[in-house]
Image: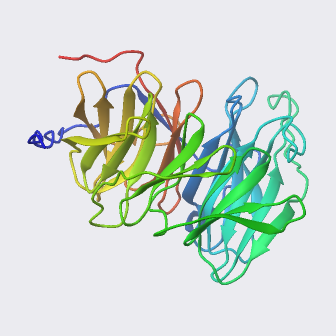
Amino acid sequence: MNRLPPPPELRADYVLEGQFFAWPLAVSGECEPIDPDSAQVCAVAPAAAGRMVWGATDGETCHVFAARFKGAAGGVMDLGTIPEASSIPAIVPIPAGHPLAAGPYSALVLAWLNPGWQLWRWQAPAPADSVQEPGYGHAAPVLLASGLDREVRALALVGDRPVVWIDRCVTAVQADGCLLELADLSAPPACSPVRLGDAYWWLSEDGALAGLGLDGSPRFSDLAVPLPGKSAALCAWGDTLLAAANGVLYDIDPAAGSAAAFAHTPLPDVQCLAGLPDGRAYGVCGHGIGHVFRVDREPARCVALGAAATAVGHHRYGFEFSAATASAEGVIFLGEHDRGGHLWAYYPPLSVSRA
């Protein structure tokens, strides 16, 4: 393997490329914010239409929230708690018209009860004009399925069925709430599954790449990356997958059967990663304060952008982030996993210097 370039030197400044916003977990002037000790954002998922962003928190209690930033709306709505939950590993928006959809805006929420797990369907309100007629009532959540004495890792909506990654197996939830095992796993997932083409892909704790087709069939691969800490960040990166493991960046192409390391991140501890269709990806690494980096495809490289901070929305330094995901419009939403956590939005520039 070719020798990798050294990690890019940290920038002694805050991020000046693009724009960060930090949104408190409340609609300002309309409702009470989530208590700071329960406001560690642990999951973020923008809906396909871009009007709604779903999220969840952990801490003393686990909350589900929905954020609206389009039209005559702006803010984060606390939809309530899952009383016995210890954490919420995943939240997945349900497309409008899907058999599981309940109203125009609904989502699947996976809760870990330690022990046991629950799969819920939540609904969010969508008032047309929050400037003059705010409305935040919503239907009660519906329990779709549950299990005992197993740790849950991830969730996806594959065809008409929710699919749950439960320790060492992948399980589909049937319409009647019964569970159907789809595949055994050699090791638990080290990251959330990522949609690429006609399959969901993930890295297991032993570094192996595994997949699940949209028809529910397992995909087998001989590809693997070293995972010294049994953790990784993964995202779609154009037509391939981008993985960050212990600060090493890998370009993984399941179709071609290749996995190549090509760069280092500025610091080894990668918190989260999100890819854009144009061949850019953005991530956060390090501890103490999060350092933001950009990954370019042509030429393949990693660029240090500076420390995460913003004075837009709220005045906030970004120390720890649990998740990053890009909307269809190219906005990256990040979940701040810290006391009094905020939902961050990052608007990347239309283009960047390649010098």
Q: Is residue 150 above or below residue 25?
A: below
**Quadrant in the picture for the N terminus:** top left
- When asked about the image quadrant of residue 213, the answer is top right
Q: At x 74% / y 54%, what residue is drawn?
A: 162
- Left or right of 241, for residue 6: left
Q: At x 43% / y 25%, what residue is drawn?
A: 348
- Left or right of 261, for residue 194: right
Give the x, y percent position of residue 15: 31, 34
Q: At x 75% / y 44%, what residue is drawn?
A: 159
Q: In this view, does 133 lie above or below 113?
A: above
Q: At x 43% / y 40%, what residue is drawn?
A: 254
Q: In this view, does 169 lie above or below 310?
A: below
Give the x, y percent position of residue 114: 63, 81
- Left or right of 87, for residue 259: left
- When asked about the image quadrant of residue 215, the answer is top right
Can residue 135 be seen? Answer: yes
Q: 289 or 275: nearer the eye?
A: 275
Q: 78 or 91: nearer the eye?
A: 91
Give the x, y percent position of residue 322: 47, 55
Can residue 316 be seen? Answer: no
Q: In this view, does 316 lie above or below 320?
A: above
